Image (tube, grey):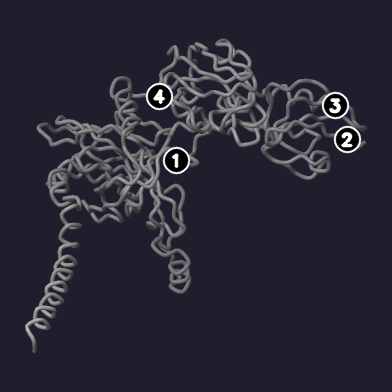
Amino acid sequence: MSRKNLNGNAAVVLSLLASIGAWVLVPTVFAAELPDFASLVEKNAPTIVEISTTRRVAARAPIADEELEELLRRLNPGEDPDLLIEGLPEQRQRAAVGSGFLISEDGYVITNNHVVAEADEIQVTLNDRRVFDAAVIGLDEPSDLALLKIEADELPFVEFGDSDVLRVGEWVLAIGSPFGLEFSAAAGIVSAKGRSVPGRSSYNYMSFIQTDVAINQGNSGGPLFNLDGEVIGINSQILSSTGGSNGISFSIPSNVAMNVVNQLRETGAVKRGLLGVRMREVDYALAEIFGMDRPRGAFVDEVQPGSPAAAGGILNEDIILEFNGHEIEYYTDLPFYVGQYRPDTTADVQVYRDGNILSREVTLGSSPTNVAASSTPEVVRDRANPLGFRVTELSDEARQVSGLSGVRIAELNAGPGREAGLREGDVIVSLNRQEITSTQQFAMIANSLPDSGFVPIRIVREGQATTLALELAP
C-alpha cells in the first residue's frame, strides 16, 4: 500500500474515532446537566411526615351466608362484607393516609384539608419513625389546606420558595406516601401555571401549579420542591380516569399557602376579601366590540348592588385589567387575587372603559366563605302545599354570588309545578306576582293561592329568568 493511501486511511480512521468520541461524550454532557435529586431528597426527607387519620363508624355485624358474603366481596373489593347494625355500642375505626411536612422546629405541620377533615384522631409519623398525636390548629376548605401541631421540638423543617417566579419547564420534586408507600420521591417538570380546577366552593380562590410529577392517592398534602430545595407548592389534586397518576397533578402555590397558614396560625381561620362582581372571560368577540387590542381581563357582567365594587365606582361592562398591582390576564385570575387580601383592604383596580384605562379604589368586603358553614337548610314540609314541590332557603354564599333573593326547589313531585316545566334546583323569586324572600313567606303565599285557575311563577334557572304559568286544579 502506498504512503499516500496509508495516510488517507489513517485520516478516515481518526475521523471516525473523533465522531465516536463525540457521541460517547454526549450522554456524559447531558448527565452532568441533570439535577442532583439524590442530594435534594437526602436533605429534605427528614422534614416529610405521614398523616394517618381515624374516623369512628358504627359497628357492623358479619353476614352469616357465605355465598352472599363472597358475592358482596366481589362487588365491593376492599370493603368488609358486613351489615350495619344500628344501636350497637361498639365502634370500629377506619383509617386514611396522606402526606404533610414540618414548617417549624416546634412541630407545626401542613397538609391538605381533605386529608384530615372530619377525622376523630390524627397521627403524624416522622421520617425517623416517631409517632405523635396531632392537634388541628385550623382548617381552610377553599384552599384545601390544614395546619396541625405536634408536641415536639428541635425538628427539621422546610424552607419556602417564591412560587410567583416559578417557570413552566422547571424541574420539581415531590416526596410523600403514595398508596401508603411512605417517603417516596417522584420528579417531573412544571407543565403550566395559573390552572383553575373545579372545587367544592362556589368561589375559585385557587390558581394551581400543574406538573407531570407522579402524584397518587396518599401524596395529598406533601411538598413540591424546586431544585434549590425550597417548597414552592403543596400537592392537592390529580386528574385521572383510574384514580392513579395520568401525569396531570395540581399543587397549591407556596405564596398562597403561606398566606393561609399565617392566618390559621394567628387566628385559626382565614378571612378573604370580597369585590362583589359577576364576571366572565373576555373572548375575541368582546375584545373587538370594546376596541381592545387583544382578549384579556375580566368582563364585569354585573356589579352586585351595595357591593364594594359598586361603592368603588366599577360599572357593568367594565373590563378589569389589574387588581392591586396584579395583572388580570384571565377572568379566573381575579377571584384568586382578591382572595389573597383580607376584608377592609383598600385595593387599586384598573378598568378598561370606553377605550380608556381608569383607576378605581375599592375597599374589600367580607367573603361568605369567612362565615362558618351553617347546617343543612331546613326543607319546608307543608303538606297543605298544593303545588307539588318543596323548597329550601338559598345559602348566604349563593345569595352573594348570584345577587338573587328567593328560594330553591329541593323536591319536585307530580303536580302543577312539574306540569308547568319547573325543575329541581330552580330559584323561585316570585309567586303570584309576590316577591319571595324566605321559605316561610313562600309557604304562606302558596297556601293562600286560589283553588283553581292560573298563577304566574317567576324563576331563575342557570342565570336566566323566566315566568311560567301554574295551573291549579279545582
- Looking at this rendering, what residue extends furthest in the left direction? 3
The location of residue 76, given as percent across then percent down, is 45, 63
Nearest to the eye among marks 3 and 1: give it.
1
Q: Secondary structure at mark 4?
A: loop
- Residue at position x 20%, y 36% in the image: 102
Q: Quadrant of residue 258?
A: top left
Residue contact at pointers 2 and 3, CB within 8 angstroms: yes
Q: Any mark on residue 449, and which?
A: 3
Q: Is residue 55 left or right of residue 308?
A: left
| Amino acid residing under circle 3 | Leu
In the rendered image, which residue does mark 1 sit on?
195
Instruction: Looking at the image, tell me whether mark 1 or mark 4 is earlier in sequence order.
Output: 1
* 395 lies above or below 18: above
Q: Any mark on residue 472, and which?
A: 2
Nearest to the eye among marks 3 and 4: give it.
4
Alpha carbons under labels 2 and 1: distance apart: 50 Å
Mark 1, residues whose alpha carbon is within 10 Å: few (<14), some, or many (≥20)? some
| Amino acid residing under circle 1 | Arg
Q: Secondary structure at mark 2?
A: strand
The location of residue 341, given as percent across then percent down, is 41, 20
Instruction: Looking at the image, tell me whether mark 3 or mark 1 is earlier in sequence order.
Output: 1
Q: Is residue 274 left or right of residue 55?
A: right
Q: Nearer the viewer, residue 271 or 444?
A: 271
| Amino acid residing under circle 4 | Gln
The location of residue 446, given as percent across then percent down, is 79, 27
Q: Secondary structure at mark 3?
A: loop
Alpha carbons under labels 1 and 4: distance apart: 16 Å
In what quadrant of the picture does the N terminus appear?
A: bottom left
Q: Quadrant of residue 79?
A: bottom left
In the rendered image, which residue does mark 4 sit on?
340
